[in-house]
Amino acid sequence: MTRTRVMASTKATPKFSYIARQPILNSDRVTIGYELLFRDGPNNSFPEIDPEKATSQLLSDHFLSTHYHTLGGKLGFVNFPYHSLVNMIPTVFPTNSLVIEVLETCPPSVELLTSIRHMHKQGYKIALDDFIPSKEWNAFLPYVSVIKFDLRQTSVDIAKQFMARTKQFNIEFLAEKIETYDEFQKAKAAGFTLFQGYFFARPEILQHQSLDPSFLTLIQLCKEVAKDQLDYPALEAIISRDLSMSYKLLSFVNASASVSSKIQNFKQAIVYLGEQRLRRFISIVAIASAQKSKPHALYTLSIQRARFCELLWQRAKKRDNSIEQGAAFLTGMFSLLDSLLDQPLENILQQMPIDSAIKLALLQHKGTLGEILDLAIGYETADWAHVSHLADKLAITHADVISSYDDAIEWADVLMDMNL
């Protein structure tokens, strides 16, 4: 099977990450923190992008790497969509520098309340963004540190009445969209203690060159965190080979106030995070690094084929046992790299230190791995005569081929739901 593709220019061009930050001030006009707003370019406006993707990109590029440059020791107010909150994504980050903003689009469900209660117990500050009073949110109030009123949507008088009714809670109130000195004075007189708006400062665009982990690193890490039991030495080995992932991990861990002394190596960092936070850390980076130009189905197919090849290799009674078990997984995964990276497969493989058996399988479809890859592709394209021939040659029962494919689909769906 031969594929021909016009090779794109290989000249590297810098990739930049953008963020807007708008100061949040106290009654004395002293900046106590910044609301961090995702941007995909130098234009100071929110792009058309999925909110979950925007949050992951912001967190990956700024909280996981340029944390101190972005915040300067102040609080970071970050918008979290519903699924990020119920999946406890904010708990990856240190409690001392993050204020978790619950977007106004989030429904006040029991599931959300459970997550908010848990994060509050861990020491996180919770803010309700663009809040409009309603009885459905009353159960959340004991766990909320800040409530933000958009004074273009809710009048100062209505906000003042709500503040009077909730004095028993230890909540600070933030007035958004302050645009004049008179509005600032009225909000302060009403009881607001935090302020944000164009009267103080417009959002400031910050730009820095972004570091994205390699596609290979992300796939290997996603595979590892999908396991029931994490293999810490394997994770350490993968992360240590990728500069950008290494940088994000160490920068992130050392930004935590609970670290009394600087963590110097990846093993310490991984152990410090623990299983849950490590899974979420990798999920955030994986989401943020997914190429926007590629359809979701292509990523799903690459992971599904990788697992299908791995299962076929395990069930083949006639195979080259000198090949490591993980080679079949990588063969399936790498078989779509030309489509994912828009480069000829031969050129991509020249840059990768992978086993010769994998290269032979990918480029010439030879050897045990080549036969397994052909079997997988034949099944995907319903070439049943070819599937039957290869299954017999590898001594894989037809029932095992079918069950391997079904298992691979289920495995890929679970992994993609977790990470992408």
Image (spheres, rainbow, N blue to C red):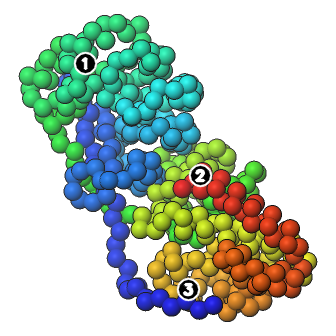
The front one of 142 and 381 is 381
The quadrant holding residue 368 is bottom right
**Is any atom of residue 182 visible in this view?**
yes
Q: How crowded is mark 3: few (under 14 residues within 10 Å), some or many (20 or more)?
A: many
Q: Are marks 3 and 2 in contact (CB under 8 Å)?
A: no
Question: Which residue bears the numbered disc 2?
Answer: 417
Q: How far apart are marks 3 and 2 (CA)?
A: 28 Å
- The label shown at residue 360 is none
Q: Distance between the residues labelled 1 and 2?
A: 41 Å
Give the x, y percent position of residue 248. Answer: 49, 57
Q: How crowded is mark 2: few (under 14 residues within 10 Å), some or many (20 or more)?
A: few
Q: Is residue 169 above or below residue 253?
A: above
Residue at point 51%, 40% (across, down): 83
Label 1: state its secondary structure.
loop
* Residue type, mark 3 in image: Leu
Give the x, y percent position of residue 188. Answer: 19, 18
Q: In this view, does 205 lie to the left or right of 289?
A: left
Question: Which residue bears the numbered disc 1?
Answer: 192
| For marks 1 and 2 on the same chain, the one whose residue lies earlier in the sequence | 1
* Residue type, mark 1 in image: Phe
| For marks 1 and 3 on the same chain, the one whose residue lies earlier in the sequence | 1
Residue at point 75%, 50% (across, down): 228
- The label shown at residue 345 is 3
Q: Is residue 77 above or below residue 54?
A: above
The front one of 360 and 29 is 360
Q: How crowded is mark 1: few (under 14 residues within 10 Å), some or many (20 or more)?
A: many
Q: In this view, does 156 lie to the left or right of 182?
A: right
